[in-house]
Amino acid sequence: MSEHVIAADLVDATIESFTQLDQAGDKRSMKKMGLRLRKEQPALLRYTATVREEHGDVIGEAAVFYGTLVWAMFQRKHGKHLARLTQENLDASQTIVDEERGKIEGLDTKPIHERVAPPLVERQPHIYAKLQELIEEDVREEAMTAICADVIYRPVQILVEAFDAATEGRRPGERQGPVVREAAKVGRNEPCPCGSGKKYKKCCGKA
């Protein structure tokens, strides 16, 4: 098995950490995580923001949550050495995921959590095992609608592919360091770039 595969114990530890934050209602730690994600993975947040723009807040929030979860799994293994995703990597990953999914006959007739191509699963088997478990559970317990799960699962697979490619070197990402602004500083009354739908001053820019 590749040294770049995220081990099952790291995946489980990530889930446990998220569960503890949720149960404790630790908004401070969750806000801190959001700020860190915005700093370290701006392309990821821009990508999940497009899901919100196309499908609305509820589905957008689910995409952000699962995207953050994927990042945290890779982050737990690679720490500060985890590459920053680039738009080029995400675009290439989307092409690869769509091509692999397109090879599967009757993909849309499978249960939603099984709508993934085996070659993708082989690269990160433990991450996919957990994602399939979580999505199946969320739909079964009506924490998420089947429509929502169907929409977000493809982007989530694209993020897994992008991080895997960056860490393995198939498609390099950017080294972590100061982010060079690509646009003007966000105003306090403007929409938060994290994709939450809230004003910046009431989200990541909250004092």
Image (cartoon, helix red, strand yellow):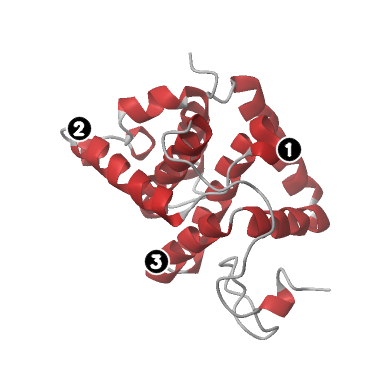
Reading the image, the residue beneath label 2 is: 104
**Badge 1 element:** helix
Residue 181's label in the rendered image is: none
Q: Are marks 3 and 2 in contact (CB under 8 Å)?
A: no
For the residue marked with disc 3, what is the amino acid?
Answer: His
Can residue 75 be seen here?
yes
- Total labels: the figure holds 3
Q: Nearer the viewer, mark 3 or mark 2?
A: 2
Going from N to C along the chain, the mark reached first, 1 or 3, is 1
Q: Give the class, few, some or many, for how many residues have Cα within 10 Å of label 2's Cα (few <14, many ≥20).
A: few
Residue 111, position as x, y percentages in the image: 32, 36
Answer above or below: position of 142 versus 124. Answer: below
State the residue at coordinates (52%, 49%): 85
Answer above or below: position of 190 versus 204. Answer: below
Reading the image, the residue beneath label 3 is: 55
What distance separates the C-alpha of mark 1 from that of mark 2?
35 Å
Q: Quadrant of the C terminus?
A: bottom right
Q: Residue furthest top?
A: 1
In the image: residue 71, left or right of residue 76:
left
Q: Give the class, few, some or many, for how many residues have Cα within 10 Å of label 1's Cα (few <14, many ≥20).
A: few
In the image: residue 10, left or right of residue 20:
left
Residue 164, position as x, y percentages in the image: 48, 34
Residue 205, position as x, y percentages in the image: 74, 73
**Badge 3 element:** helix
Residue 119, position as x, y percentages in the image: 32, 26
Q: Are marks 1 and 3 in contact (CB under 8 Å)?
A: no
* Res 206 → quadrant: bottom right
